[in-house]
Structures are given as C-alpha cells and as structure tokens.
Image (cartoon, rainbow, N blue to C red):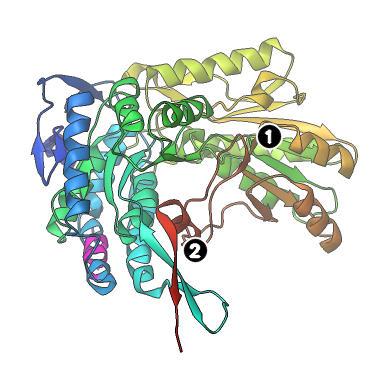
Amino acid sequence: MNTPLPDWHARAAQVRLDGRAFIDGQRIAAADGETFACISPIDGRTLTQVARSREADVDHAVASARKAFADGRWARQAPAARKQVLMRFAEKIHAAREELALLETLDMGKPIQYSLSVDVTLAVRCIGWYGEAIDKVYDEIAPTPHNSLALITREPMGVIGTIVPWNYPMIMAAWKLGPALAAGNSVVLKPSEKSPLTALRLAELAIEAGLPEGVFNVVPGYGHEAGEALALHMEVDAIGFTGSTRVGRKMLEYAGRSNLKRVYNELGGKSAFVVFPDFDDLARAAKTVAGSMFFNQGESCNAPSRVFVHESIADDFVKVVAATAPAHQPADPLDAKTEMGALVDDTQLKTVLGYIEAGRQEGAKLVAGGERARAETGGFYVQPTVFDGVANGMRIARDEIFGPVLSVIRFKTEEEAIAMANDSTYGLQASVWSSNLNRAHRVARALRAGTVHVNQYDEDDITVPFGGYKQSGNGRDKSLHAFDKYTELKTTWLRIDG
C-alpha cells in the first residue's frame, strides 16, 4: 500500500512558529524585546517575528556557554556518554524530519522534496557520524628517549561561535555542530537572519536528546549586530564561519581586534567544470552540470557556474544544456514534484537579475532563461539561465552570483583550459571530464581547488573534507579533519627515572 504524500500546504497553514532565541536551555525574547520579520520567499508573506539578538543577548549566550564549559557538564563527560547524546540528537532530527523540512522550505524557498531528502537527511548523517567518531579518535605518543614520555592530546577549545548562511541552514549548522560538540566544546550559533527557524528548532531537539543546558545556544539576528558581537567577543575561543568572502575578511579583522580567536572561514566559489572532446558521453556531462548548477536555485558555493568546453564540442554541449532548462523551471516549493524553488529574498532576486543584465551588456549570448518567473505569487523566482560565448573576464564569469546562472566558456587546448580555470580568486571545487586516464589525472592535479571531481560532480559524503584554496577559505568542514578546527593540541612531557 502506497503512503499518501503529505499535503504540505495544509501543514504550512497549521505550523506553529517560535522565533525567540535559545539560551541556557530555554526560549527567550531578546533583551530589549525587539524582533524582525521572517519573510517567506515563496510568496513574500511574513511567517513570524524573530528575536533580534544584539550584544546583550550574545553576552548572555556566551556566558551560558562559558559556564557550561567551565563546570565540565559536557566537556568532561566520557566520550561514550557524549556519543550517546549525539546519537539521540540525530535520532530526534530524523523523527522531526517532516517538520524541519517544512520549516526549511518556508524559510528559504527550496523545494520541499529536497529539504526532506537532502537537507534533513544530511544533517542527520552528520550529527550521527560525529557521534560515532567520538570514541574512534585516538591521541598520540611521540617517539622520545627511554627516560621520557611525550603525550600528544586533543582538548576542546572552549566556546565556539558559529555563523552560518541561509542557503543550507540545517546542513551548515550540522557541519559546525557535529565536530564542535563531539570534541566537548560549547557552541553559540548565529543563523542567518534570512533563515533562522531550523537552527532554533535544532537547539530544542538537542536538549530533548540530553545535551546539557548552556552547551548549545542560538542567537538569531543580523550580521552587523549579533554576528559582529559574537566574532568580537573576548570569551569566544574560535569562530566557524560560512558565508561570503567579503564577510570572511571581517571575521579575520574581528579576531585581530579582540582576542586573536581562531577563525575558520568557508567562503565563496566560482567552480570550473572542464569538458574535453575525448569524453565519451557528452550528454551526461551536460545534464550533470545543469542539474548541479540549478540545484538549490544556484544558491550553492560549489555550484559549477564556469563551464569550460572544448570548441569542437561546444555547440552540441550548449544545445543539451539549454534543452534541460525546462525541467528546472521554478515552481511552487511546497509541491512535492518541484525541482527548483525561490531565491531567498528580494535582495538576492535583484542581485541575480543584475548579473544577468550585465552578461547581456558585456556581450555574452543568452541561450536559455534570463527572466524573473512567478512574479504574480509575490515570491522571488528566476528562470534557469544559460549564457554561451562568455569570456573569462566578464563579471558573470568572475563574481559569485549565487543564482541559477551558468556561463559556457570555450577553449582550444588543455593548457588554456587549465589556465582559465585557475584564473579565479576562488578555489573551492572543480570538475574534469575526460575518458583519457592520463589527462584526467594530469588536469585534476593542475586544478587549484579543494575538491576536484572526475567525470562526475554530484558525489559527496560526510567522510571527505570540504573547503577550498585561495579566497574560498581555510580549514575544512566534514570528515575527521574538522576536529582540527575545534580542538587544541597539547603536548605533555613526563620524565621517567630509573
């Protein structure tokens, strides 16, 4: 018997939203009582009012986190005990998956099918994986003379401030929370003001799972208020930030102005997708880049927005990409069949449309999309857009657009393709498509990016690190390497007499 699909519109009409902050284990209003409107990009309506956290609220949250760390209610628990709490946390997220998926879609406009199958699923996997990893990570003994013993141990840093973006609110929060909590830290999370709802609900679920009060706090608010206060706070030991390169620079500045806290930036991207004429399935490459580029409305830091195609196959490649566009036309995000939803807000809509106009003005050839869609709904939708004849110096090829805009750039030689692909301030991800094993390895080694895909672009897992070269950031999210960001290494020397 088939299970009937949820009526997401009916559920949306009945959902009860709580926009208050979460500090010291409970929901509370901002200290001054102020709020801001949480707007749904689906139709432009106000979902609820959210606590506008400022410096006083951040002080409260950090003090709560510091007290929890100092008294050891979490940090000094046995690894096996922390593991059980995080595993229950993952189970709680899974049990609330439909509620969380609905909040994510209402808040930032992505299709409900992907909020459910991707965002919630990956958040569950992340928290559970780091729970499992807690008692699998061993310390070290250095090779020293017989009359000494040198222990190399990892210790939690203390209070971690995490600032996450609006494009994948749950996943980005989980990527920070998993390793930070597993290592024994306390966390203060500042979600984007554009998508705060799931972060606040996650904090409640963590308490239900047994996480002690004060260990995980959420302060919703604006970046220049709550975010800046958190990054400047003298009692915050590290900042885990995901967002724009512009704000990432500010994070480093704030560290210099305060206590020289560690700053780990996961920033922007302008990922290169390089297709050679010897690849034996051109249609698969074209469909893959379209699916990856238009997924999440193009609001992905790793979106393959620069597509380098050899001139001998470019015409055929562009035809296939353009033909896929109708399958990604924006539609109602609460319809379970929708492939592409709304951009996060009116500001992002105007930004994306501005870049599309810049592409036209600079001489690129528009072959698909290029217009606003579904304006009558009051929401913020843009057609999947494909430009051909793009030069690598054009704005649409240089800047991170964060929208469904794909640029095709033609090349003549392998050397030219590598040079253009690397000619970017970013270095997050890249992809090379070739059936020649030597070329695939050669080009993959030459591309300056944190992740290079070969003959695919979609594969990913919590077990592999995520991060980039150059102005795409520093440090790595995911995998065991993420523990490096949230622990201190201590060497303890012991003298042995006898």
Mark toward the start of the polypeptide (1 vs 2): 1
Over which residues does the magenta segment extend? 84-91
x%, y% of residue 257?
42, 26
Residue at 27 percent of width and 61 percent of height = 90
Residue matched to label 1 = 306
Q: Quadrant of residue 436?
A: bottom right
x%, y% of residue 19?
16, 32
x%, y% of residue 245?
53, 29
x%, y% of residue 171?
38, 48
Q: Residue furthest front?
A: 498
Residue 463: mark: 2
Q: Residue furthest top?
A: 361
Q: Quadrant of residue 410?
A: top right
Callout 1–callout 2 Cβ contact below 8 Å: no
The amino acid type, in three-letter code, at marker 2 is Thr
Viewer-side residue, 298 vs 130: 130
Does residue 9 appear in this view? no
Q: Residue furthest bottom?
A: 498
Element marked by disc 1: strand
Element marked by disc 2: loop
* Mark 1 crowd level (few <14, some 14–19, many ≥20, 10 Å Cα): many
**Residue 90 magenta-drawn?**
yes
The amino acid type, in three-letter code, at marker 1 is Arg
- Vertical placement of residue 479 versus 243, above or below: below
Horizontal placement of 418 versus 449: left or right? Answer: right
Viewer-side residue, 186 vs 192: 186
